[in-house]
Amino acid sequence: MAVERSFVMVKPDGVQRGLVGEIISRLERRGLKLVAARFMAVSRELAEKHYEVHRGKPFFEGLIRFITSGPVMAMVWEGPNAIEVIRSTMGTTNPVQAGPGTIRGDLAVDIGRNLVHGSDGPDTAEKEIALWFRPEDIVEYGRAADPWVV
Ligand code: RTP
Ligand code: MG
């Protein structure tokens, strides 16, 4: 079992709807550990770098406008298989297909307003963490709960 880190962001819709705590709570209750967090406005430059793979797609411009439209909660979460665990906790990209019990399946209905981002693989996780955080912003610590989770 690999301990991984993933970049997670509560998107502007999640902040505006008052769901930051709900989303953090679901990840905490799953057993994952928060190791970095930054509540921040997103510049166009940062947004374009983050979503570089989508440049040229029809939804790119709208996506950049959306993600820069208000503050986000940027975080790094750690845990066994954290990347896949977070993706499954979030639910599918389009909330219409997301299963009940997932963040998107319970709390969202629109693909362009799907509340949360989580890295989709180890390479993107590493890139995204380096894009949003400095190495010294990531806190290494043990928790009393750790041996009870794994
Ligand atoms: P994210 O990167 O935001 O975590 O979402 P994801 O991996 O589940 O989905 P991805 O394919 O990376 O798409 C990034 C975001 O772009 C918006 N999108 N809109 N057809 C569309 O209108 C469309 N497709 C994607 C979504 O908000 C998606 O989260
Ligand atoms: Mg993605």
Image: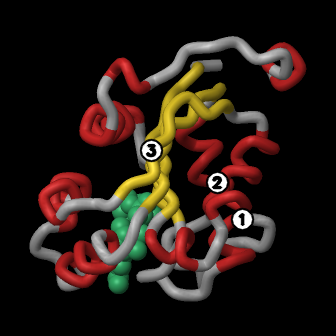
Q: Nearer the viewer, mark 3 or mark 2?
A: 3
Name the N-terminal-most of marks 3 and 2. 3
Residue 76 place in picture, x, y as percent? 49, 37
Q: Amino acid at mark 3?
A: Arg
Q: Reading the chain from its start, which is encountered first: label 1 or label 2?
A: 2
Q: Tell me, yes or no, whether the two marked residues, 1 and 3, touch with CB atoms within 8 Å.
A: no
Question: Decide: marks 3, 2 in contact (CB < 8 A)?
Answer: no
Disc 2 residue: CB within 8 Å of ligand 1: no
Q: Position of residue 141 (x, y in %)?
A: 63, 13
Please tell me whether residue 46 is drawn above or below residue 44 in the rendered image.
above
The residue identified by callout 3 is 38
Query: Tag 3, which secondary structure?
Result: strand
Residue ID for mark 1: 102
Q: Nearer the viewer, residue 121 or 14?
A: 14
Image coordinates for residue 48, horizontal then vertical, percent? 16, 61
- The amino acid type found where label 2 is placed reads Ser
Looking at this view, is 86 or 146 the one in front?
A: 146
Kindly check if marks 1 and 2 are in contact, taking CB atoms under 8 A apart as contact: yes
Q: CA distance from mark 1 to mark 3?
A: 24 Å
Q: Residue sitting at 42 percent across and 82 percent down?
A: 112
Instruction: Kindly identify which numbered label has been placed on residue 88.
Output: 2
Q: Residue at x 54, y 69 (%)?
A: 15
Residue at position x 50%, y 40% in the image:
37
- Quadrant of res 58: bottom left
